[in-house]
Amino acid sequence: MNFKIYAIVALTAVLATPITAQQQQLCRADGCAYEHSHANKVISKCCQAINPDPVAFHDCCGKSCNTGIPCKSV
C-alpha cells in the first residue's frame, strides 16, 4: 500500500515539474534572430541577467540584436 502511494506521489512530481518550470524569455524584437536559435538564446540570457523586467528586457533585446550592445550573440 505504501509503495502505491509513493509511486503516485513520484509520478505526480515528475508530471508537475515541466508545468512549474519557468520558461526562458526569448527576444522577439525587430532585428533579432529566430527565437529558438543559439544567437537568440545567448542574447536573451544576457538581457534577462541585466534586467528581467519585460519592458527593459525587450529594449535590451532590440539594442543588442541591432548593435551588439549591451549583449553580443557570439
Image (cartoon, grey):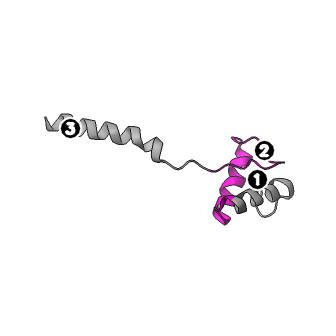
Q: Residue 71's quadrant in the figure?
A: bottom right
Q: Residue under label 1, please give it.
A: 73
Query: Is residue 8 toward the left or the right of residue 33 in the image?
Result: left
First to last magenta residue range: 25-54
Helix, strand, or loop for circle 1? Answer: loop
Identify which amino acid the numbered label 3 is placed on.
Ile
The mark closer to the camera, 1 or 2, is 2
Q: Residue under label 3, please give it.
A: 5
First of labels 1, 2 by sequence position? 2
Residue 74 can be seen, yes or no? no
Query: Is residue 44 toward the left or the right of residue 17 in the image?
Result: right
Identify which amino acid the numbered label 1 is placed on.
Ser
Identify which amino acid the numbered label 2 is placed on.
Ala
Identify which residue, 3 or 73, lies in the foreground. Answer: 3
Identify which residue, 54 or 73, lies in the foreground. Answer: 54
The N terminus is located in which quarter? top left
Helix, strand, or loop for circle 2? Answer: loop
- Residue furthest left in the image: 1
First of labels 3, 1 by sequence position? 3
The mark closer to the camera, 3 or 2, is 3
Q: Residue under label 2, please give it.
A: 33
Residue placed at 38% from the left, 39% from the top? 14
Residue contact between numbered discs 3 and 2, judged by CB atoms under 8 Å: no
- Residue 54: x %, y % from top left: 67, 58
Q: Residue 8's quadrant in the figure?
A: top left
Q: How many marks?
A: 3
Query: Mark 3 to mark 2: distance in Å?
Result: 47 Å
Residue contact between numbered discs 1 and 2, judged by CB atoms under 8 Å: yes
Query: Mark 1 to mark 2: distance in Å?
Result: 9 Å
Query: Mark 3 to mark 1: distance in Å?
Result: 48 Å
